[in-house]
Each structure stands twice: as structure tokens, then as C-alpha cells.
Image (cartoon, helix red, strand yellow):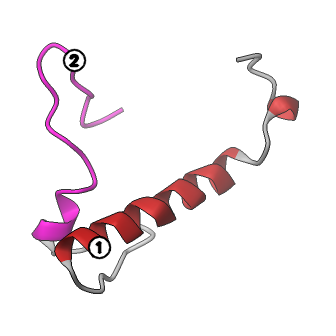
Amino acid sequence: RSRKRSDLNCDILEGHISATLCHMANASYRVGRTLAFDMKEESFGTDSEANRFLSRTYMAPFTVASAV
């Protein structure tokens, strides 16, 4: 809340990677198999069943832009 980096418990990238690991484990559990994750693209490659867990469908007008 203070917007000070010194108040954070860890680096922002470290927090992102930690959260991503949890989301990857959840996706793997839900599809019932081992998944291969492309760290550079931040996706499961061509696995459309697993990739659907990377985002959600938002109700208008509460949408997130595809390109930020």
C-alpha cells in the first residue's frame, strides 16, 4: 500500500514466479497429467486444454486488455 519497494517481502519477479508455480500445479492437477510449460512465452505451448487455465472470460465492462 505504501508503494515503497523496501516494504515488500520479496522482489516483484520472485513473487510472480512463485505464484506462477502454484497456478501451473493447479492446471496440471485439473487436466490430470504432467504439463510442459514454456517460461519465455508463459504458456503451455500448443496444449489448449491447459492454456485455458491461464486466463478467464471476463464480463463486460470488466475486461482486461489483451495488449497492455
Q: Which residue is drawn at 24% across and 37% down?
A: 66
**Figure quadrant of residue 9:** top right
The residue tagged 2 is 62
Q: Which tag is nearer the camera, tag 1 or tag 2?
A: 1
The residue tagged 1 is 29
Earlier sequence position, callout 1 versus callout 2 = 1
The crowd level at tag 2 (other Cα within 10 Å; few <14, some 14-19, many 20+) is few
- Please tell me which residue lies in front, 54 or 41: 54
Q: Is residue 40 left or right of residue 11?
A: left
Inspect the image, locate mark 1, and give the three-letter code of the amino acid beneath it.
Tyr
Quadrant where the N terminus lies?
Answer: top right
Inspect the image, locate mark 2, and give the three-letter code of the amino acid beneath it.
Phe
| Start-end of magenta stretch | 48-68
Residue 53 highlighted magenta (yes or no)? yes
Residue 11: x and y in percent read 74, 48
Provide the secondary structure element on which disc 1 rests.
helix
CA gap between label 1 and label 2 equals 28 Å
**Majority secondary structure of magenta residues:** loop
